[in-house]
Amino acid sequence: MSVDERHPLEAWPDYYTYGGLPHVITLETPKKKENYLKQLYATVYVNDIVERYNIRGEAELKELVHVIASSIGSPTNPNKLANTFKSLKNVSLTNKTIDNYLGYMSDSFLIEKAIRYDIKGKKYINTLAKYYFSDVGVRNSILDFRQQEENHIMENVIYNELRIRGFQVDVGVVEHRTTDKDGKTIRKQYEVDFVANQGSQRYYIQSAFMMPTDAKERQESASLLNIDDSFKKIIIVKDHIKPKRNEEGIVTIGLIDFLLKPNMLNW
């Protein structure tokens, strides 16, 4: 059976492993795909960054790329990364150098930065950000195809698809305040995976790999339920399901429908 004849769910493992670069699909074996992606990363991305910005610490640059690749979808910043290198990697990289390297990686289209956005306060929070890879196959090649967390890769794929469709994509933060039995105010922050904006359109989107129980569904819905505006709230799951809308108005759709049917966001 050719790739084109397969059901999209059958093709999904190849996509989240080898990414979406056109040449990859023409290569016949997994080994050829892996070698191509590794060579592309080494000869195009790394060499280009090193030569363009006259970087002397190529090993440190590669180590930083490796750290970012290992933690896609995790909020971080140059200070936090500098502490990671200091405590775990035994490598001395200042937060300024890390900030420069992250900028170089973004300029080379290796990664993109998603800034945190306070939904209720309507302002950006510059303390932490998330970084996603422009191609998940290149990301996997950096880790020698050994770190295949499908849930995190799925989040990266959703981010990329939203960007391809022309959305500005931020990471949402919602603060909820309650009082305890003593009347003391308790603040709790919820994260919305993506706040996708395009003109007057806005969608709040959660990437939920699986929601096998009602408890898990409530957990994934918590951040969305704390948003008090009227923009559409969507949960994307990996399962191939029939779209549904609950009584709070939250829509749940399958990943394949999201990827192949752009109008599903307006279901």
Image (cartoon, rainbow, N blue to C red):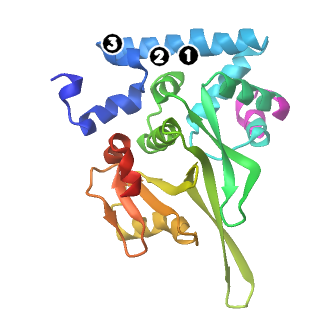
Which amino acid, by three-letter code, is at mark 2? Leu
Q: Is 81 placed above or below 253 here?
A: above
Q: Residue 228 colored magenta?
A: no
* For the residues bearing labels 1 and 2, Cβ distance under 8 angstroms: yes
| Residue 221, percent from left and from top | 47, 66
Query: Circle 1 — which element?
Result: helix
Q: Quadrant of the C terminus?
A: bottom left
Classify 10 Å Cα crowding around label 3: few (below 14), some (14-19), many (20 and above).
few
Which of marks 3 and 1 precedes in the sequence? 3
Name the residue carrying label 2. Answer: 37
Instruction: Report the amino acid beneath label 3.
Output: Leu
The alpha-carbon separation of the residues under discs 1 and 3 comes to: 17 Å
- Which numbered disc covers residue 27? 3
Tell me if residue 253 comes above or below residue 104 in the rendering.
below
Residue 157 spot, x, y in % from top left: 46, 38
The stretch in magenta equals 83-96
Q: Secondary structure at mark 3?
A: loop
What is the number of the mark on residue 41? 1
For disc 1, the neighbor class at 10 Å (few under 14, some 14 to 19, many from 20) is: some
Q: Residue at x 15, y 23 (%)?
A: 1
Find the distance from the CA under tag 1 to the CA under tag 2.
Answer: 6 Å
Q: Residue 231 vs residue 257: left or right?
A: right
Q: Return the residue found at the far left.
A: 1
Seen at 64% across and 60% down, the residue is: 173
Type of the residue with mark 1 = Tyr
